[in-house]
Image (cartoon, grey):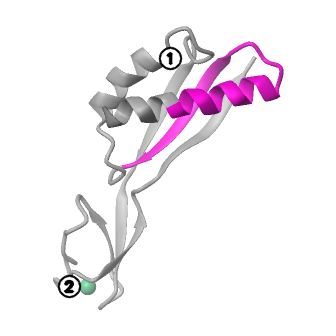
Amino acid sequence: MHELSIAMSIVDIAEQEVKKNNAAEVIEIELEIGKLSGIEPYALDFAWDQAILKTVLEHAKRKTRYIEAMAKCQDCGNEFEIDNFYDECPSCQSYMKELLSGKELRVKSLTVI
Ligand SMILES: [Zn+2]
């Protein structure tokens, strides 16, 4: 499962951070996930519970922020929200666009003790 390997790589990041700070564990972790990152929230929740067992994240409170996907039309310059990459521009129906946000997948912050 895609989400499980993502959850496990976040555990790796957290373990490195704990080691670097000579800390014991993570008490809070904040993630940012774009709506077009290909991550299913439900699958991530499920994978997360398995991935964090017996790790520094086991007792961490997880905050996840899902970021709207935004695109800029390359024909008319309109900026609009999209649900998938093939959506057309609502003002000129062009398919030519630049993705401004929505593919994020990052650990925004970690609090260790
Ligand atoms: Zn347009």
Q: Along the horizontal axis of the image, is 2 left or right of 12? A: left
Identify the residue shown where x is 46% and y is 20%: 51
* Residues rendered magenta in the picture: 9-34
Q: Which residue is disc 2 drawn over?
A: 94
> Residue 20 appears in which quarter of the rendering?
top right
Identify the residue shown where x is 71% and y is 29%: 16
> Residue 103 appears in which quarter of the rendering?
bottom left
Judged by depth in the image, the label closer to the viewer, 2 or 1, is: 1
| Residue 109, percent from left and from top | 64, 37
36 falls in the magenta region: no
Which amino acid is tagged 1? Ile
Q: Quadrant of ligand 1?
A: bottom left
11 falls in the magenta region: yes
Q: Is residue 73 above or below residue 29?
A: below
Q: Along the horizontal axis of the image, is 102 left or right of 58? A: left
Q: How many marks?
A: 2
Q: Which residue is disc 1 drawn over?
A: 52
Labelled disc at residue 32: none
Crowd class of label 1 (few under 14; some 14 to 19; many from 20; radius 10 Å): some
Residue at the extreme bottom of the image, as rendered: 75
| Residue 44, percent from left and from top | 35, 30
Q: Is mark 2 within 8 Å of ligand 1?
A: yes
Which amino acid is tagged 2? Ser
Q: Along the horizontal axis of the image, is 98 left or right of 86? A: right
| Residue 107, percent from left and from top | 57, 40
**In terms of secondary structure, where does tag 1 sit?**
loop
Identify the residue shown where x is 32% and y is 79%: 97
> Residue 70 appears in which quarter of the rendering?
bottom left
Q: Is residue 37 above or below residue 80?
A: above
